[in-house]
Amino acid sequence: MTIDRKCLINWVGGKRLLRKTIAPLIPKDIKSYIEPFGGGAWVLFYKDKWADLEIYNDLDGRLVNLFRIVKYHPNAFKEEYKYLLGSREMFMQFLKGTPITDIQKAVQFYFLITRSFGGRGETFGTVKKSSGGASKSQKNVAEKIDAIHNRLDKVMVENRDFEKLIKQYDFEDAFFYCDPPYSCGCGYAVTTTEGFAHEKLREVLGNIKGRFLLSYDDSPKIRELYKGFEMIEVERLNGINNKNGGAERKNRMFKELLIANYPIKELHENVG
Ligand SMILES: C[S@@+](CC[C@H](N)C(=O)[O-])C[C@H]1O[C@@H](n2cnc3c(N)ncnc32)[C@H](O)[C@@H]1O
């Protein structure tokens, strides 16, 4: 079994299943690539380099600490990780405990996310049948850390609210891939979906000099908010147990929108 060295963690709302659809829509003539809602950074990591300047940002300090530690202290991370057991007791201990150093904080957060049900870091995840367990292998984790460490070499890691970040890095040749919390569904540690400033994001994106590509859930609210922008509908499988086919599969299709302030329809038809 091969492991996906191109990403570090599965994150709620992560674009693992859509990254192949999104990638061809990203313009080639950009001078900077910025992800204001970085999460697990599936699109950023999909390619070895998008632009000379690349920025990962998320408001969740636990994610930012993880990526900063992998960027600056990969060996310390691997050393700390190597003695961990894949046990429920350790999971509960990390859930309740307070890590002392930033390295411990990163390792424990990584452990909780990769060992939990649905990647939410809340309940210990178990399986009845192994699907290879590649991400649980100590050797594979070490290889993954090295790969992500190399990928992050020139990526700046920021920890700001999207509004400040977008305004700060905007210019004519900037490109923003935005993957905010959906307008409905589950939220994040830093915000609920209802509490998230969807209107503010629309206002900020409507005033930038650079280009943006935005992914959202397909809802009347979002269609109304972004009326006038180019929009394409895409579908992906919903949920974690998505290997079966047939009607069951159809019920689990989830509709998303890709919205941009530059032409994307033609690009999408040419690849699709
Ligand atoms: C849909 S997820 C991003 C998933 C990511 N594209 C991936 O592939 O894993 C949305 C992210 O936005 C972050 N977020 C929520 N509110 C934010 C804000 N005001 N500013 C910046 N990031 C925010 C959340 O912490 C979450 O990680």
Image (cartoon, grey):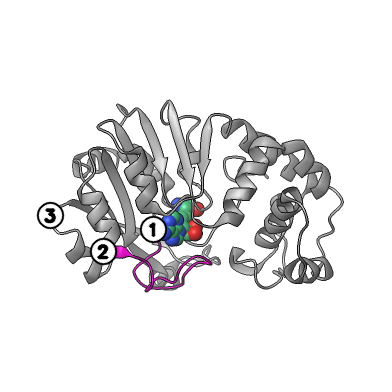
Tell me which amino acid carries mark 1: Pro
Q: Return the residue at label 1.
A: 180
Residue visible at 29% across and 26% down in the picture: 29
Question: At which x and y percent is residue 175?
Answer: 32, 37
Q: Quadrant of residue 6?
A: top right
Question: Which one is nearer the viewer's eye here, 185 or 200?
Answer: 200
Q: Position of residue 250 (x, y in %)?
A: 38, 69
Identify the amino acid type marked 2: Glu
Q: Three-letter amino acid code at disc 3?
A: Gly
In this rendering, position of residue 173 left or right of residue 151: left
Q: CA distance from mark 3 to mark 2?
A: 15 Å
Magenta region, residue range? 181-199
Q: Which residue is mark 3?
A: 228
User: Quick check: 249 left or right of 70?
Assistant: left
Q: Residue at x 30, y 40 (%)?
A: 25
Q: Is mark 1 within 8 Å of ligand 1?
A: yes
Relative image position of residue 195 (x, y in whole percent):
38, 72
